[in-house]
Amino acid sequence: MPISYYLALSAVLFGLGAIGFVFRRNIITIFMSIELMLNAVNLAFIAFARAWGQLQGQVFVFFVIVVAAAEAAVGLAIVIVISRNRHSLNVERINLLKL
Amino acid sequence: MTLQMLVFLVLAAVTVAAAVNVVILRHPIHSAIALIVVMVSLAGVFLTLEAEFIAALQIIVYAGAIMVLFVFVIMLLNAGEEERTNMSRMARYVGVPLAIVLLGELAYQVGAATFSMTAQPAANGAIHGLSMLLFQDFVFPFELTSILILIAILGALVLAQRREGVPAKREQQNVS
C-alpha cells in the first residue's frame, strides 16, 4: 500500500479545508474548515510515521490534537463574545474595531 | 485489488464526501455533523496505518469533545442558515475554477510522488513505543501542554462570562 495514497487523501482534505476557509462567511464554519485542515495534517504525520517506522509522527499528532482542543475552546469563547455584541455570525459584518 | 486497498478506498471515499459536505452545506450544524463523520472515518484510516492509540484519541478527544463543543456553541448561538448571496464575479469565475485546480494539482503531485517506505512497525506495539517517547524524550512539551490547557480553560471562562454591570446598563438605555 504505497504511502502516497494516504498523502493524496491528506492533500485533498487540506485543499477542501482551505477552500471552505476562504469561501464561507459563517465564522463557525470557518473554524470547522480550520479543524479539517488540522485533521489532514494529522493524517500526513501518521502516514509518514508508518512509512519511516518511527513514532515521533504520532507524538506530534498527540500534541496537535491537544493544541487544537485548546484553540477550539478559546476561539469559540471569542465567537460567543462577538456574536453577543454584534448579533451576527457573518464575518462580512464584523469589520469594525469599535461598534 | 487487495483487501487493504479496498478498505482504504471505502474509508477515503467516505472522508472526502463528508469533507465536501462540510464545505458545501449551508447550515453550520450540518457541517458539524459532516465533520464528525470525517473525524471518525479518519480514525479508521489511522487504524489501517497501525496507529491505534491515535485513532482512539481522535474519536475520544476530537470527535467526542471538540466537535461536541462546536455543536453546543452552534445551539447556544442559535446559528441559522447562511444567507444566500451571490458570489462576486471574481469569486465565481476565477475563484472556484482555481480552487478545483488547486485540489487536482495537490492530489496529483502528492499522489504520484514515490517515497521509499521502510515499513517496520514498532517492536512492542504502538502504545508502548509512543509512551516511551512521550515520557522520556518529549516529557517537557507534554507538561507544557497541560499548562496550555489550563490557560485555555481560564481564557475561555474569562471571555465568555457576562460582566456584572453591562446588561443592566443597556436595559436602562433602552428604556430611557
Image: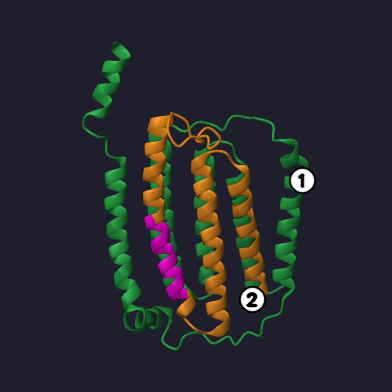
Chain colours: A orange, B green
Residue count near mark 2 (Cα–Cα under 10 Å), binned few <14, some 14–19, many ≥20:
many
Q: Quadrant of the N terminus of chain A?
A: bottom right
Mark 2 on the same chain as mark 1:
no
Q: Quadrant of the C terminus of chain A?
A: top left
Instruction: Tell which of B10 and B56 is nearer to you.
Output: B56
Residue on which the image places disc 1: B94
What residue do we see at 54% from left, 32% from top? B81
- Prevailing secondary structure of the magenta residues: helix
How many numbered marks does the figure carry? 2
Task: Give the Cα separation between the discs numbered 2 and 1.
Answer: 33 Å
Residue type at mark 1?
Answer: Val
Residue type at mark 2?
Answer: Ile
Which quarter of the picture shows residue B132?
Answer: bottom left
* Label annotation for residue A3: 2
Image location (x, y in percent) of residue B159: 31, 43
Is residue A69 located in the magenta-colored stretch of the structure? yes
Residue extending furthest left?
B164
Image location (x, y in percent) of residue B171: 28, 18
Q: Which residues are magenta?
A: A58-70
